[in-house]
Image (cartoon, rainbow, N blue to C red):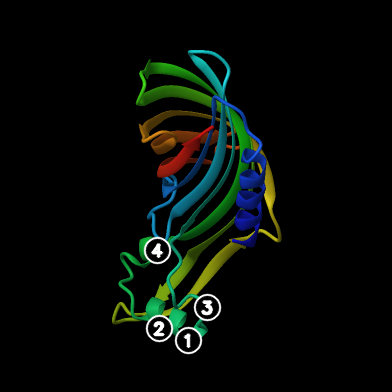
Amino acid sequence: MKKIFFISLSFCSFFAFAQEKNKVFVNSGLSIYPNMKENQRNFNISVSYHRQRNEKWSMEYYFLYSQNDYFPSFYGNEKELDRFIFTGNPETIFEDTEWDFVKNHEIGAKIHYSIYKNRKVNLSFNMGLGIIAYKDKLFRLSSIHVDENNVIDSFSWIEVKGTGYSYTAGIFPGLHLDYKVGESFLVALDGGYHKTINNFSFWNFSIGIGRKF
């Protein structure tokens, strides 16, 4: 979160010197990871700068933080983890212990094309290119053994966890809508699909506040 605060502060300093046709937004919302079984403790926060090139085209430069954490709160307690597995249903325990975690930092640029625009409303389609630095972890049971009463009495498991950040690049199509409130303040809705070259993907939805310069 310290990194997010520093980047937000840098953006604000930059925007203090911005000229006409510039916009700045701070957004927050939910990220949906379709390749994960569940989406829990999942959110995103972003800051972005939009520069209007002409009536239809504009550029956006952004930073986005996103995460999804489906690991249970007791995972770090070995006794609680053992109890959960040993008392689980042998027929569903493999599915019940499919736990995933990911967090990523993304920086990039988008080209916007205005689909509809008037004095108050701006709706645009965008296409982005970016770099993602991400950490992920997963837990899976690899085997179990049950006794004559069909109760789990032993098991083995796999945890896959990176030692640091991994990096990838991708392309990100989306939609942006902003509505002007008063002289220069804006409210915005954003949505998009993030797809990387190593098949890492998620949907991103957020609401934001902004200002036009």
Which numbered dot is residue 76? 3
Viewer-nearest residue: 109 or 188: 188
- Residue type, mark 1 in image: Lys
Please indicate whether residue 175 sits to the left or right of residue 108 in the image: left
Which numbered dot is residue 154? none
Viewer-nearest residue: 183 or 200: 183
Badge nearest the viewer, 3 or 4: 3
- Identify the residue shown where x is 36% and y is 67%: 93
Element carrying mark 4: helix
Q: Position of residue 19 (x, y in %)?
A: 61, 28
Q: Which residue is mark 4?
A: 94
Q: Which residue is mark 1?
A: 79
> Is the residue 22 above or below the residue 36 in the image?
above
Q: Mark 2–mark 3 contact, CB under 8 Å?
A: no
Q: Which residue is mark 2?
A: 83
- Identify the residue shown where x is 36% and y is 65%: 96
Q: Mark 1–mark 2 contact, CB under 8 Å?
A: yes
Q: Position of residue 176 (x, y in %)?
A: 42, 30
- Residue type, mark 3 in image: Gly
- Identify the residue shown where x is 51% and y is 64%: 139
Q: Position of residue 199 (x, y in %)?
A: 55, 37
Please indicate whether residue 116 sits to the left or right of residue 13 in the image: left
> Is the residue 22 above or below the residue 168 in the image?
above
